[in-house]
Image (tube, rainbow, N blue to C red):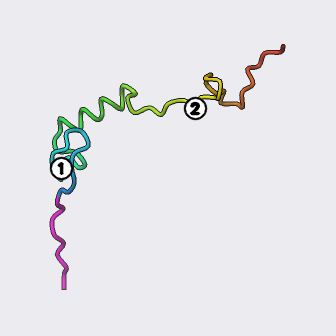
Amino acid sequence: MASTKPPLMASGTCPICSRPTDADYRPFCSRRCADVDLSRWLRGAYAIPDAESEDGDTAEPDGGETGRED
């Protein structure tokens, strides 16, 4: 006996415009919203900010050494 699966239904809302999602563009509602999201990724709008030290300077990724000798 072959089991039949129900068609994929879109659920939730679009993260760009909050409209109901479309299964063809999931998790977005349309090609436009998918392109808006891609544009944001390519521009770096979703970049994770650098960690800052207590005095407000950005932390050095290698433990804070700058390579200079005082």
Disc marking residue 21: 1
Q: Which residue is mark 2?
A: 51
Mark 2, Cα crowd under 10 Å, few <14 / some 14-19 / many 20+, is: few
Q: Name the amino acid, label 2.
A: Ala
The residue shown at (61%, 23%) is 56
Query: What's the distance in space between the residues labelled 2 and 1, CA to CA?
Result: 35 Å
Question: In the image, residue 67 lies at what x, y percent?
Answer: 77, 19
Q: Quadrant of residue 44?
A: top left
Give the quadrant of the N terminus. bottom left
Q: Quadrant of residue 63?
A: top right
Quadrant that contains the C terminus: top right
Tell me where residue 4 sits by quadrant: bottom left
**Which residues are the magenta region?**
1-9
Labels in figure, total: 2
Where's residue 50, x and y in %? 54, 29
The amino acid type found where label 1 is placed reads Thr
Q: Is residue 60 above or below residue 1?
A: above
Q: Which residue is pictured at 83% across the width and 15% down the height?
A: 69
Q: Nearest the camera: 24 or 37?
A: 37
**Helix, strand or loop under label 1:** loop
* Magenta span includes 16: no
Image vertical order of residue 1 relative to residue 33, above or below: below
User: For the residue carrying disc 1, how many other residues have a C-alpha within 10 Å: few (<14), some (14-19), or many (20+)?
Assistant: many
Q: Main secondary structure of the magenta part?
A: loop
Dot 2 or dot 1, earlier in sequence: 1
Q: Residue at x 62, y 22 (%)?
A: 57
Which residue is painted at 28% across and 35% down in the image? 37
- Of circles 2 and 1, which is in front? 2
